[in-house]
Image (spheres, coloured by chain):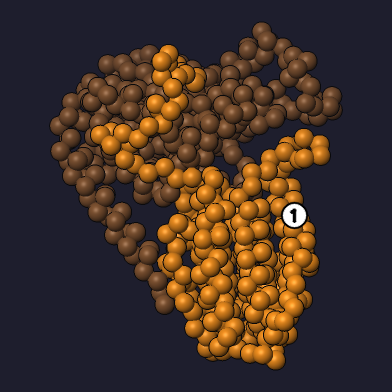
Amino acid sequence: MSFNGFSHSVMGASHVAKGIVCQDSSAHKITDRYAIAVVADGHGSKKHFRSNIGSQCAVEATIETIDRFYEDPDAFEENLPKNHKMIIRNIERQIIAAWNTKVMKHLEENPVTAVEKKPFTQEEFEAINPESYYGTTLIAAVAGRGFTFGVQIGDGSFVAIFEDGEAVMPMEYEEANPANITSSMCNANAASMFESFYIDDKRPIALFSSTDGLYTSFGSEYDFRDYHVILASQVNSPSLEASVVKNITKRSHFGTEDDISLACVYDVEFAQEKVDLLKEMIERNKKLAAERKARLHTANF
Amino acid sequence: MNNNNNEVKENTTVDDLLDFDDDDPLGATAVSKKSLVIFFLIDTSGSMKGKKMGQLNTVMEELIPEIRRVGEADTDVKVAVLTFDTDVKWMYSAPISIEEFEWARLGAQGVTSMGAAFTELAARMSRNSFLNSPSLSFAPVMFLMTDGYPSDDYKAGLKALQANSWYKFGLKAALGIGDEANDDMLEEFTGSKDTVVHAYTGGQLAAMIKIIAVTASQIGSKSMTLSDETNEELSDEDVYAAKQKMLGQQIQELVGDQTDAGDVPYDTGW
């Protein structure tokens, strides 16, 4: 098993225009036992005025937590398949605890300034929990020896391409309904708001985590999935990373103008072995998309 | 670790990054703009037969390019048309981008199953159905047009609709065509008097449909997160309440400017 990966965050077109900093963070880590792709989307609204720091803390906390669980890799690889529900729940709790420690340390070292307090009345400011200053989502995907798992809190997407070349989304996309409140690392009951998945009967070609700016730049979920098959077919191309940065910049500019982060880990040899299958899947997906479009444009009258 | 790690590098401009490159497999993937769905609920019962329906078809054909202009800048307006007579039917099987939308001319027959139309709309206004596009960014616009009173239990349908959160947060407007349309019932649908208008003549019908559809699309696709007066962040509830109020005010202003000298009233001239 030889993994590789990439991670990129681009600033939203609307944030550039308003002079706001990028609220997204992303990272990936490759070891000889596992590979992790993680992204986080800081909420960015008024009371989450340090969410760019919050998202950075979230990706760091996640990688550090997974590293800790892998301190004894043989034991972890033996135990996870037997007791994945409990262990993943424990990972989620540890990520929250590590994130809380990081943001509280940041706050201690960097007390809230008069400029940061200015938009609030004293009463309003006192009503905000300090964790909320750093509010963020988190999506992490881990490929290990013989298993794949992921954890997520808040919106954003996880897409896996397994050995059959299909793009699957094992975690449900959180509905951005107008009445919905996004789950966040800063919620008091954050540990109970995580979603997770665990798969050990399929070998992954590539795993992708992305913030919701990527998903919302697509017209349909089919297109979103098909995009990841194209990505998976290109992972061994030396020009892929430049192409990803260019493409997500374009998607932010012409799409929802939000920050976009995309992190990926992939199995180098398996992706090479399956490249013809992935190309076939791309052609099949194009045909299916054309059929869907033709059906849609047939009037019922 | 990346936090906006992709600042544009020296000698690379944003325009370079935005160039389309045909050789890049990712470059060929389509980017969707923020989108809004406008639902037209159209009475196609027997009483609409003849000039009313003929004119409505013509107006709707003319309206499409006008709505296209609303979306040109940064919003993809999608259209879904639900007709109701004895049966309830969608013109297309899902909302279609205004850029690709073609009006299919409607006929008229049968009774007015408006309650069934409300129930159908409530079922389709869901992330699992007509509102499933990832790029959907705004609550929908719902525009009801009718010339008469429902022949079924519209209150049961309206109750289903009122339980739908997209309905609650969406923009609602209604057009009563001719003397028989019931304003109270239309107001029950929109939730306010200001967003109910009447057309008594062919000229008014054309003007009102255009005013409502274009104004609602413009307001519906507006990003409103801060209050103009206080510069405070608005909650979702406040945004949609502000939009519905703005729609009512603008409709009333524009309707007040309309003149119909020489136009023939429906109920005598049709």
The one nearer the camera, A30 or B231, is B231
Residue reaching furthest bottom?
B268
Residue at mark 1: chain: B
Residue B177: image location, x then y, percent = 67, 80
Residue B95: image location, x then y, percent = 47, 61
Q: Is residue A2 above or below residue B110?
A: above
Residue drawn at x 78%, y 66% as measured from the top left: B256
Q: Amino acid at mark 1?
A: Met
Residue A262 image-quadrant placement: top left
Tint of chain B: orange
Residue reaching furthest front?
B262
Crowding at mark 1 (Cα within 10 Å: few <14, some 14-19, many 20+): some
Residue drawn at x 66%, y 70% as measured from the top left: B207
**Residue located beneath label 1 in the image:** B246
Residue A131: image location, x then y, percent = 66, 24
Q: Is residue B233 above or below residue A75?
A: below
The one nearer the camera, A95 or A213, is A213
Can the viewer see residue B154? no
Can the viewer see residue A183? yes
Residue drawn at x 63%, y 12% as measured from the top left: A106
Residue drawn at x 81%, y 39% as measured from the top left: B229
Residue B60: image location, x then y, percent = 54, 70
Horizontally, is A233 left or right of A28 in the view? Answer: left
